[in-house]
Structure formats: structure tokens, C-alpha cells
Image (cartoon, rainbow, N blue to C red):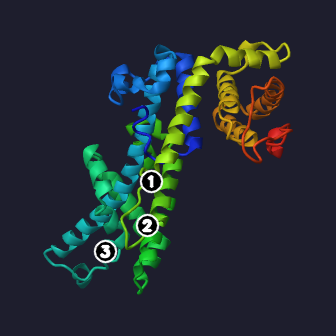
């Protein structure tokens, strides 16, 4: 099945980022931006290309980029579980320290009567006992066993924090407070740790842009936990949403490749004698993806498409790219609308004037 790994509830914004990165690697043809073939082949098999849509399209043209996207999404799913596992391992490290203190030759009263509130955290225990969590981490052999220094580092940072002290000193025990300290941990510790950032970068190039998004998913998972029911992991999405995201990702990637020349002609026609070669590759990719989305996805509002790709330009292109892309997309949108190539269905999906609507004061400078 196409995109068999897309059962993780990944956001469309992150899908756009991943597709942009893959198209950049695909079209630039630089050695450092291409995955090794044997690494990609671990993700999917030739069965992948038997998706119905592929039978009508150029398989040889899109096969490798699709496999790269599958691999990238798989890594994001792994990261989600790695982060949850990080919490479990920090708790287990706390347990080991308590056990070591109790087994000292001359333990103190504090060693024998430790505050066990964190290691007794009901939400962590619930996660440890979650069958889906155990099945995934076991099947994919996810572990922090080779990074004991990271677990210790995060635990020590946790114990120095004010929110941890407040939690441990609170005499009342409540499930919501157990969840709160875990959300505080993910909000404050991994993102502020240089060691964590270093290890993440070493482990996978795909995680550089995923961490903030996936941390948000982890916090959302914890926030949604209930003491009387199984943990609802974010990769257990509903069938309809999963199908929509599969179709979105597949079409956004493959149609952009298949209609590359058509989209380039549209860009060239709208640049008013501007040499196409002078346009940065990143700008051209963002423009082609936006044109693709405007034409291929009738239920996505025009202003949403503009906003998403202008935001993408701010992070992945030149400082003035968002202004350039906004103006050019407005011209292209006008031409496509007049030729009847853009049709939006549903209330409130058509924006009649997009000029400067999406630019912040900083962008206009």
C-alpha cells in the first residue's frame, strides 16, 4: 500500500516541508542531498508503486522521491516514539538512583525514605503499560541504551527546575498534576539541551526540522491522556484523515514533478522578462508546489495555500523571497483563474484579491 507509514497523524505543514526538501534534493542532483539507494530501499518495496494512481503516471520519474518521502515520514514517526521513550527512560534512571542510594553501605534517612512521586507518576506508568507503545518500540527496536549520558543529563536538568520542585513538594496527588509535570518536561528540557540537539542531528538528518513539530504532538498526546482509558497515540489516526493525507502528500509530490515544465512556463510567463535562471532554486520549488496546490486541491482555500508557502519561503529561501513569491503567485493566480484552471469548492474558499494580504510589515520592508 502506498505510504503505508502515513498512519502517524502528521500535519500538512510538515508534509509540505518534507516535500519541499525532497524536491530540492531531487532537482538539484547534489550528492549530499540524495539518500543512498540501499537506505531508501529499507523503507518500501516495489509493491509501493502498484498504487492505482501510479499505473496512470510515470513510475520511473516519481518512484525514488516517493520512497524518500515514505522514509522521511517513517523517521518522523520513529522520533515521536523516541521522545515518549525518553520520558520512560528518565523515570527509570530516577528509579535506579533511588535503588543505589538505598543500597549504600551507610544510607541516610533520606536514602531510605526517598520522595518517589516522580517514579510513581501515573501517566508515565500508563505509557509504559500501553500495548501500542510497547509494540511499536519493540518492533522497530527503538532504544536510548547507547545514550546513557543524555538520560542522566536530562534527569539532572529536570531535578534542577522549579516546576519539578513544585511537583515533588506538593502534598496532594492528582493525575492532572502528573500529566502537567511531563508536559513541562517536554516544553523545557529537550529543546533547551545542546546535548540533545547534537545527538538528534547525529542520529538522523530528517529530524532537524521535525523536532518542534513532533514535540508538539508528544505534548498533545500527554494532554489528551485519561486515567481510565488506554493512551491514544498520535499515530492512530482515523481512516478518513489518513486517506486524505496520503492523497495530499502523493499528489503534491508527484504532480509537481510530472508538471514541472508546465509550472516553469507559468512562472516564466509571469516574470516580465526576468531571466528564469536568476530565480533561486528554492523559490522555484516553492512556486511550483504552490501552483500545484492551487490547481490540484479544490478544497484548500487560496489564502491557506498562500500563507503556507510564504511561511515556507521565510525559513528555506532568501530574506526577500516571501515578497517576490507573493507578487508572482498573485499574477499566476489571476492567469489561472481567468483560464478556468482553478476551481474551489465549498463556502469561503475563494479569495478575490491576494495582493499583500499575507505579508507582514517586516516582509514589505
Q: Where's the N terminus, which quadrant?
A: top left
Instruction: Tell me residue 275's x, y (percent).
Output: 78, 12
Query: Relative to 124, is 40 above or below?
Result: above
Query: What kind of element bears circle 2?
Result: loop
Q: Which residue is mark 2?
A: 225
Q: Earlier in the sequence, mark 1 or mark 2?
A: 2
Q: CA distance from mark 2 to mark 3?
A: 16 Å
Instruction: Give yes or no for contact between labels 2 and 3 (Cβ–Cβ under 8 Å).
Output: no
Query: What kind of element bears circle 3?
Result: loop
Task: State the residue at coordinates (73%, 34%).
Answer: 319
Q: Is residue 8 visible to the viewer in this orientation of the structure? A: yes
Q: Earlier in the sequence, mark 2 or mark 3?
A: 3
Instruction: Tell me residue 365's x, y (percent).
Output: 85, 39
Task: State the residue at coordinates (46%, 56%).
Answer: 218
Left or right placement of residue 17 versus residue 272 in this view: left
Instruction: Tell me residue 117's x, y (percent).
Output: 34, 77
**Mark 3 or mark 1, whichever is nearer to me:** 1
Q: Residues within 10 Å of mark 1 (few under 14, many from 20)?
A: some
Q: Which residue is mark 1?
A: 234
Query: Relative to 355, is 222 above or below?
Result: below
Q: Which residue is mark 3?
A: 120
Choose top left, top right, bottom left or bottom right for residue 264.
top right
In the depicted view, which residue is nearer to us: 10 or 219? 10
Amino acid at each position: 500500500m502506498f505510504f503505508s507509514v502515513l498512519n502517524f497523524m502528521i500535519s500538512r505543514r510538515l508534509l509540505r516541508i518534507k516535500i519541499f526538501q525532497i524536491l530540492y534534493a531531487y532537482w538539484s542532483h547534489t550528492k549530499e542531498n540524495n539518500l543512498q539507494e540501499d537506505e531508501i530501499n529499507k523503507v518500501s518495496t516495489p509493491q509501493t508503486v502498484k498504487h492505482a494512481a501510479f499505473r496512470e503516471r510515470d513510475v520511473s520519474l516519481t518512484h525514488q522521491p516517493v520512497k524518500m518521502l515514505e522514509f522521511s515520514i517513517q523517521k518522523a514517526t520513529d522520533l515521536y516514539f523516541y521522545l515518549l521513550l525518553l520520558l520512560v527512560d528518565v523515570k527509570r534512571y530516577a528509579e535506579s538512583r533511588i535503588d543505589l542510594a538505598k543500597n549504600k553501605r551507610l544510607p541516610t534517612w533520606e536514602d531510605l525514605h526517598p520522595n518517589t512521586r516522580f517514579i510513581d507518576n501515573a501517566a508515565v506508568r500508563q505509557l509504559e503499560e500501553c500495548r501500542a507503545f510497547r509494540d511499536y518500540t519493540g518492533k522497530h527496536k527503538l532504544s536510548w541504551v547507547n545514550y546513557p549520558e543524555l538520560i542522566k543529563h536530562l534527569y539532572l536538568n529536570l531535578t534542577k527546575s522549579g516546576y519539578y520542585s513544585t511537583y515533588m513538594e506538593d502534598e496532594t496527588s492528582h493525575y492532572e498534576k502528573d500529566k502537567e509535570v511531563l508536559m513541562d518536561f517536554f516544553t523545557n528540557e529537550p529543546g533547551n539541551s545542546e546535548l540533545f540537539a547534537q545527538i538528534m542531528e547525529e542520529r538522523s538528518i530528517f529530524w532537524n526540522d521535525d523536532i518542534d513539530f513532533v514535540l508538539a504532538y508528544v505534548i498533545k498526546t500527554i494532554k489528551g491522556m485519561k486515567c481510565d482509558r488506554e493512551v491514544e497515540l498520535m499515530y492512530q489516526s482515523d481512516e478518513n484523515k489518513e486517506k486524505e493525507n496520503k492523497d495530499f502528500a502523493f499528489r503534491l509530490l508527484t504532480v509537481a514533478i510530472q508538471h514541472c515544465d508546465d509550472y516553469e512556463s507559468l512562472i516564466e510567463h509571469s516574470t516580465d522578462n526576468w531571466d528564469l535562471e536568476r530565480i533561486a532554486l528554492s523559490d522555484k520549488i516553492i512556486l511550483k508546489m504552490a501552483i500545484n496546490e492551487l490547481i490540484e486541491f479544490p478544497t484548500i482555500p487560496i489564502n491557506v495555500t498562500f500563507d503556507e508557502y510564504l511561511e515556507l519561503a521565510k525559513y528555506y529561501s532568501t530574506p526577500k523571497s516571501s515578497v517576490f513569491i507573493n507578487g508572482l503567485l498573485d499574477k499566476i493566480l489571476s492567469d489561472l483563474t481567468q483560464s478556468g484552471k482553478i476551481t474551489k469548492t465549498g463556502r469561503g474558499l475563494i479569495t478575490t484579491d491576494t495582493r499583500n494580504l499575507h505579508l507582514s510589515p517586516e516582509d514589505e520592508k
